[in-house]
Image: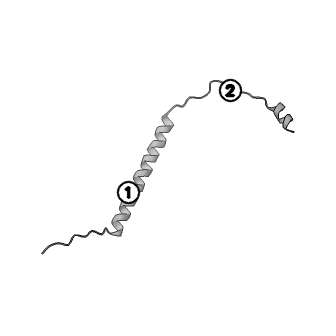
Amino acid sequence: MQLKYNRNQSISGSIVKIILKIILVLFILVIGIFLIEKINFPTPKQNFKIDITNEIKKLK
C-alpha cells in the first residue's frame, strides 16, 4: 500500500510559521535598536544663541 503525500499544509502549521517569523523580525528590530543606542553620534561642541527678535519685529 502506497502512502498518500499530503501537499496541503494544516492551518495550525501555517499559523505557527507566521508567528515564528513575526517573533524573529521583532527580535531583530529590538537588537537593532539596542545597537543603535550604543553608537555615539557626534554632537555640536558649542551652543548657538541666535537672536531673532529683529526678524520677528520685521514680520509684524
Identity of the residue drawn at 70% across and 27% down: 48
The residue wearing badge 2 is: 47
Q: Nearer the viewer, residue 58 or 21?
A: 58
Residue 2 position (above or below residue 42): below
Residue type highlighted by circle 2: Asn
24 displayed left or right of 6: right
Mark 2 lies on a secondary structure that is: loop
Residue type highlighted by circle 1: Leu
- When asked about the image quadrant of residue 13, the answer is bottom left
* Disc 1 crowd, CA 10 A, few/some/many (<14, 14-19, 20+): few
- Look at the image and tell me in which quarter the N terminus lies: bottom left
Residue 59 place in picture, x, y as percent: 84, 38
Residue reaching furthest to the left: 1
Residue 21 position (above or below residue 37): below
5 displayed left or right of 25: left
48 displayed left or right of 56: left
Identity of the residue drawn at 42% across and 49% down: 27
Residue 23 place in picture, x, y as percent: 41, 54
The residue wearing badge 1 is: 20
Disc 1 from disc 2: Cα separation: 48 Å
